[in-house]
Image (cartoon, grey):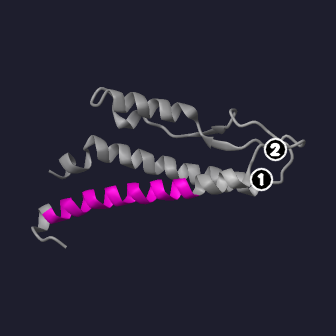
Amino acid sequence: MIDHILARENYEIAKKLLDAAALRQEAIATNLANLETPGFKRIDLAPDFAQQLARLSGNPGSTSADSLQPKLAEDRLTQSLRPDGNNVSLDRELLEMNRNAVEYEFLTQYASDSIRRLKTAITGRVQ
């Protein structure tokens, strides 16, 4: 029964998205730390993660969430507007940090609710 609840596809995807949110937070911290480094190129989650996620959500049950592997990559889509080649924008990083925090909060709430339902099923008590 525990495996049935914790191995559900949505729970597995939520765990992978939590991993991705933690990795994105590291990227944002690195970008902010290098805000004034000449020639630094911002990093973010590799775009193929979003493609993997879209492929998985388009075909539920056909691909395991285990195949989702978030990783960091240089952001090649953001243009540098500064003469030193650095393409990190303080405003953009702060916006991404807030967005990532909201996403992380939602995902932790979802995972907590899954575990709370399991605890309710085991103990028979709603807390």
Q: Give the secondary structure at mark 2.
A: loop
Is 96 in front, or is 127?
A: 96
Q: Give the secondary structure at mark 1.
A: loop
Q: Which residue is mark 1?
A: 34
Instruction: Identify the residue shown where x is 49% and y is 35%.
Output: 50
Nearer-N-terminus badge (1/2)? 1
Is 122 in front, or is 116?
A: 116
Q: Residues within 10 Å of mark 2 (few under 14, many from 20)?
A: some
Q: Which residue is farthest bottom?
A: 127
Tag 2: amino acid: Asn
The magenta region covers 98-120
Instruction: Identify the residue shown where x is 33% and y is 33%.
Output: 64
Q: Position of residue 80 (x, y in %)?
A: 79, 39
Q: Is residue 82 left or right of residue 15?
A: right
Q: Is residue 60 left or right of residue 49?
A: left
Q: Which residue is mark 2?
A: 86
Q: Position of residue 79 (x, y in %)?
A: 76, 36
Asked if residue 44 is among those painted magenta in the image, a careful observer would answer: no
Tag 1: amino acid: Asn
